């Protein structure tokens, strides 16, 4: 079934995404996620969670080494993306961001990486 | 030849041929980012399937090889730290930030290469100041033009 935008989610709602340590940049004394953290060439769907339908501990359960960022729904939508429900996933807070093409996915990844905020940051060991 | 190279040629018109100055700067500093990049690539090459917790395959060997070739192609440039990471699906990405310019290169699982240039404005990065495209693997030298853009040359 094709994904459809979850119109019940306003642009101001907040999404959470897990960030593995390999996606964290340490530069000029601060940490930021790489844009590739918001790109998925495997499923072409970027997995996220609606912040007010879950909590950080739940999202990170089973992934103790991962960090967590938050960003507003409007950012992927501004790049042509949709934020779709995943009926196959029993977690009601789970969504996937889908884009019309990989070019949009890359551009949105850049925007999200710029504007995302850390909810939980575990600095990578190598930095 | 860049404007910087012209300046060098004027400073040393007889002692140094023009070609010596094209696109090459401090080798010592270049080695720092190159060595860091190769170390990071070594770490990434050890990732296994599901490294992202989403079922991604491990980084593909062809992607690792192409990233190595990319680095070799530009290892003479004096660049800021190259941030290399795995991409879900088996590819790799690398990005640099230099003042108001960001350059991202992505090696896809099949070894093909895509780039994204983004220029920062006073209000940040937006879609109107981004440009993306592809680089053919048999034309890796084209990445030099992107590096020159990153450096503002």
Image (spheres, coloured by chain):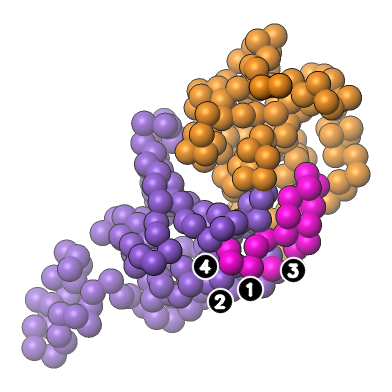
Chain colours: A orange, B purple
Which span of residues is magenta-colored?
A: B45-63
Chain at tag 4: B
Q: CA distance from mark 2 to mark 4?
A: 16 Å
Chain at tag 1: B
**Which residue carries the number 3 mark?**
B46
Q: Quadrant of residue B24?
A: bottom left
**Which residue carries the number 1 mark?**
B39
In this view, the mark in front (4 or 1): 4
Q: Quadrant of residue B17?
A: bottom left
Q: Counting other residues with Cα less than 10 Å from the Cα at mark 3, is it few (<14), some (14-19), or many (20 or more)?
A: few
Question: Which mark is on residue B35?
Answer: 2
Query: Do tag 1 and tag 2 residues touch (Cβ < 8 Å)?
Result: yes
Q: CA distance from mark 3 to mark 2?
A: 17 Å
Q: Counting other residues with Cα less than 10 Å from the Cα at mark 4, is it few (<14), some (14-19), or many (20 or more)?
A: many
**Which residue carries the number 4 mark?**
B66
Q: CA distance from mark 1 to mark 3?
A: 11 Å
Q: What residue is at 37 percent from the left and 41 percent from the top?
A: B131
């Amino acid at each position: 079934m094709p994904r459809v935008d979850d119109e019940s989610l306003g642009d101001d709602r907040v999404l959470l995404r897990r960030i593995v340590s390999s996606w964290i940049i340490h530069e000029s004394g601060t940490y930021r996620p790489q844009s590739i953290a918001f790109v998925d060439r495997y499923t072409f769907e970027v997995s996220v969670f609606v912040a007010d339908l879950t909590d950080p501990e739940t999202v990170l359960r089973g992934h103790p080494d991962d960090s967590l960022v938050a960003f507003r729904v409007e950012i992927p939508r501004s790049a042509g993306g949709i934020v779709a429900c995943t009926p196959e996933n029993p977690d009601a807070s789970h969504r996937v961001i889908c884009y019309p093409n990989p070019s949009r996915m890359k551009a949105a990844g850049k925007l999200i990486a710029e504007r995302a905020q850390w909810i939980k940051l575990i600095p990578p060991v190598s930095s | 030849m860049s404007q910087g190279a012209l300046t060098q040629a004027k400073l040393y018109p007889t002692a140094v041929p023009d070609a010596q100055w094209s696109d090459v700067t401090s080798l010592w500093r270049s080695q720092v980012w190159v060595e860091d990049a190769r170390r990071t690539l070594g770490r990434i090459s050890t990732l296994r399937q599901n490294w992202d917790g989403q079922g991604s395959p491990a980084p593909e060997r062809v992607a690792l090889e192409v990233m190595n070739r990319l680095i070799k192609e530009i290892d003479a440039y004096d660049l800021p730290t190259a941030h290399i990471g795995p991409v879900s699906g088996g590819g790799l990405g690398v990005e640099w930030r230099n003042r108001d310019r960001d350059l991202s290169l992505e090696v896809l699982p099949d070894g093909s290469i895509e780039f994204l240039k983004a220029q920062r404005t006073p209000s940040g990065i937006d879609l109107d100041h981004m440009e993306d495209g592809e680089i053919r693997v048999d034309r890796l030298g084209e990445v030099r033009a992107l590096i020159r853009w990153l450096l503002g040359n």
